[in-house]
Image (cartoon, helix red, strand yellow):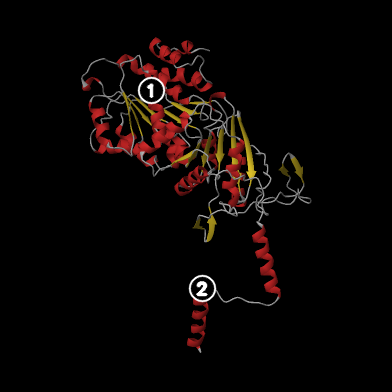
Amino acid sequence: MKFADLGLIPEVQRAVAEAGYTEPTPIQQQAIPIILQGNDVMGGAQTGTGKTAGFTLPLLNRLAPLATSSTSPARHPVRALILAPTRELAMQVHEAVQTYSKYLPLRATCIYGGVDMNAQIQELRRGIEIVIATPGRLLDHVQQKTINLGQVDMLVLDEADRMLDMGFIPDIRRILALLPAKRQSLLFSATFSDEIKKLADQMLKNPQLIEVARRNMVSETITHRVHPVASGLKRNLLAHLLRHQPDDQVLVFVDTKFACSRLANFLERHAIAADSIHGDKSQQQRTETLEAFKSGKVRVLVATDVAARGLDIDDLPYVINFELPHTAEDYIHRIGRTGRAGRLGNAVSFVCSEEKGRLAEIEKLVKLQIPQEVVPGYDPEPDFFDAGHKRKRGGRSSGGDAPAPQAPRPPKSDDIRRPGRPQESRRSGGRKSTVAPDGFDFNRPYEPSSAAILASEGADASAKAGETSSPSRHKRPIAFLLGGLGRKQA
């Protein structure tokens, strides 16, 4: 099937052809004809299947008869409203609208938080037919009376499940109350929950359900793998794997903003081009970081779940879950950044003992037992494997009664001391650690220096001889206080 067979107008077909697309994806084949007929749609599709074009192309096709080249703002009322959960996704949808509407006199704008409203207000005042917005900033404009939603003919709610996760459902209901009752509504979501179904019942009228794959399933082009590893060795393992794949771009997911920046700095110190993106960064910083990652200037992008939606990167080979998400559905959203549009992708997860429960929930959701492979030298905690559970090490398997011999384990701290060099120390986790110099081979076991061995032997000899050293300056105040306390009680 070709795009010409879907009933799109020549202007839209021309823009699609110039964008390099010839055949529609399954979601586009099913959704476009139904939307062109004016029906409401509830669409379920895996991320990266062409869902954005699936609703953008018929939207432009339906608005084309209303388009005008008049310069009067009154001739360009808001006809279509597209709601997205994140700034990145809103910008991605806006870019698609601009690409496909290049031969139509339709105006579109993107409004989101984190930037000054004045520029957005000026844009809205000149007349806009298509508005792509995040819910919070849209309500800001409604409150400021800088936007009128009274003539909206089409409403699109993209990534509805993410809206739910981010707490936007009350805002969505407020927006629905501002829209005309007579309109066409489209709801798209990668996963469906009871709350999403309730929202669909509220905003859709006799919708047609479109699903191109089983619900909550991931793309079949993605290869999954789990590396069991001790929590304290995760950063060293990440650096080790990145150095063995020197040319591949990688998107790494963590749970918190603090861990995001800290991990990116750790990789930078070890000569791996990395940057971070999270909610505390300004919109300009986030945009610059994404552009650097897409252009290849930054090889590793460390992100929180704010980037799990809206990142559209051509042929991203790897997604690494440095920490498993707390919600199993977020695993689907994260790894959806790779294996897009039929391309091959890899989803790698680092799992420690505390995350075994999350892993079990993910495997239950995706109906897949993910292969586990221990990287030699980066073993998990002793309680990770249950009795009789088979584990894979370097291509060989061993039962629980006879575990495979373990390779020498590197030190547990993230920064490894190299004897004979000036040490740059800092406090971390209550103990002193040192920054490893660039170029350190993480796969090489730690070997103490001869001076350290002699010092250790001397300490053992002193202990055998019954020699004792004076209390340290840290212990004296404690002993003094305890002694004073005993005298006071007496």
Label 2 Cα neighbours within 10 Å, binned few <14 / some 14-19 / many ≥20: few
Circle 2: residue type:
Arg
User: Residue drawn at (30%, 28%), measured in percent from left and top?
Assistant: 180
Numbered label attached to residue 97: 1
Of 303 and 460, the residue lying toward us? 460
Residue 22 percent coordinates (x, y): 50, 14
Residue 9 percent coordinates (x, y): 40, 11
Label 1 Cα neighbours within 10 Å, binned few <14 / some 14-19 / many ≥20: many
User: Residue drawn at (52%, 85%), measured in percent from left and top?
Assistant: 486
Q: Is residue 66 above or below residue 348?
A: above
Quadrant assignment, res 154: top left
Q: Is residue 225 above or below residue 152?
A: below
7 vs 327, left or right, is left
Numbered label attached to residue 473: 2
Q: Is residue 237 visible?
A: yes
Mark 1 residue element: helix
418 vs 184, left or right, is right
Mark 2 residue element: loop
Mark 2 or mark 1: which comes first in sequence? Answer: 1
Q: Is residue 172 visible?
A: no
Residue 359 percent coordinates (x, y): 60, 44
Q: Is residue 125 above or below residue 354?
A: above
Marks 2 and 1 sit apart, C-alpha to C-alpha, by 68 Å
Circle 1: residue type:
Val
Quadrant assignment, res 121: top left
User: Residue drawn at (40%, 18%), measured in percent from left and top?
Assistant: 100
Q: Nearer the viewer, mark 2 or mark 1?
A: 2
Of 51 and 269, the residue lying toward us? 269
